Amino acid sequence: MRDDERAQVRRLTDGGEPPAAGAAESAPARIWRQLELPPAAGAPPGFAARVAARAAAERRAAFELPLSPRWARAAAALAVAAGVVVGASLGLLTAVDEEAAAALAWSEASLAEELVAGLDAGLSSLAAPAAADEVTP
């Protein structure tokens, strides 16, 4: 053992004589086992009050209107009003003819009936293949 190792072992064993080699290796382990964690620190004073105050401030800020210039709010209101006017005028000016209204109306037939009718129409439009002697060059 070197001198610095002996000094370390003496410090670890409270200044006694250096123990035997096997005991010197177990001394750090014994000291390590004797170490205890410090007690858990609690929350600092006033922590809960600060958290509650911050949550209340964020709740209030969520319901407040954003701080924007008056001209921006006025421009937004004019844009909304112009959109309502344009939409209403287009709705009133558009004439709906009876064919378009009929196309938008619900069909009396079910979807399955329409499918069968479409298949029948498609199958009946197919002609039977011509016989070999009927083909003209």
Image (spheres, rainbow, N blue to C red):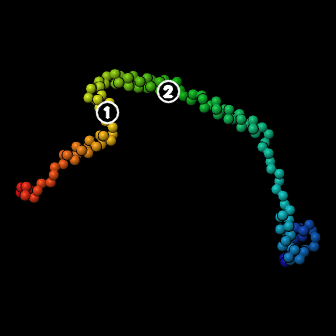
Kind of residue at badge 2: Ala
**How many residues crowd mark 2 within 10 Å: few (<14), some (14–19), many (20+)?**
few
Residue 128 x, y percent position in the rendering = 16, 52
Task: Give the distance between the C-alpha atoms of the residues marked 1 and 2, in whole angstroms.
Answer: 52 Å
Q: Quadrant of residue 54?
A: top right
Residue 119 x, y percent position in the rendering = 26, 45
Q: Secondary structure at mark 1?
A: loop
Q: Does residue 86 appear anywhere in the picture?
A: no
Residue drawn at (44%, 25%) of the image: 80
When the figure is inspected, residue 129 is found, relative to residue 69, above or below; the finding is below
When the figure is inspected, residue 23 is found, relative to residue 91, above or below; the finding is below
The residue carrying mark 1 is 108
Q: Which mark is residue 137?
A: none
When the figure is inspected, residue 85 is found, relative to residue 124, above or below; the finding is above
Kind of residue at badge 1: Glu
**How many residues crowd mark 1 within 10 Å: few (<14), some (14–19), many (20+)?**
few
Residue drawn at (92%, 68%) of the image: 15
Q: Earlier in the sequence, mark 1 or mark 2?
A: 2
Front one among 125 and 64: 125
Residue 11 x, y percent position in the rendering = 89, 67
Quadrant in which the N terminus is drawn = bottom right
Residue drawn at (33%, 41%) of the image: 112
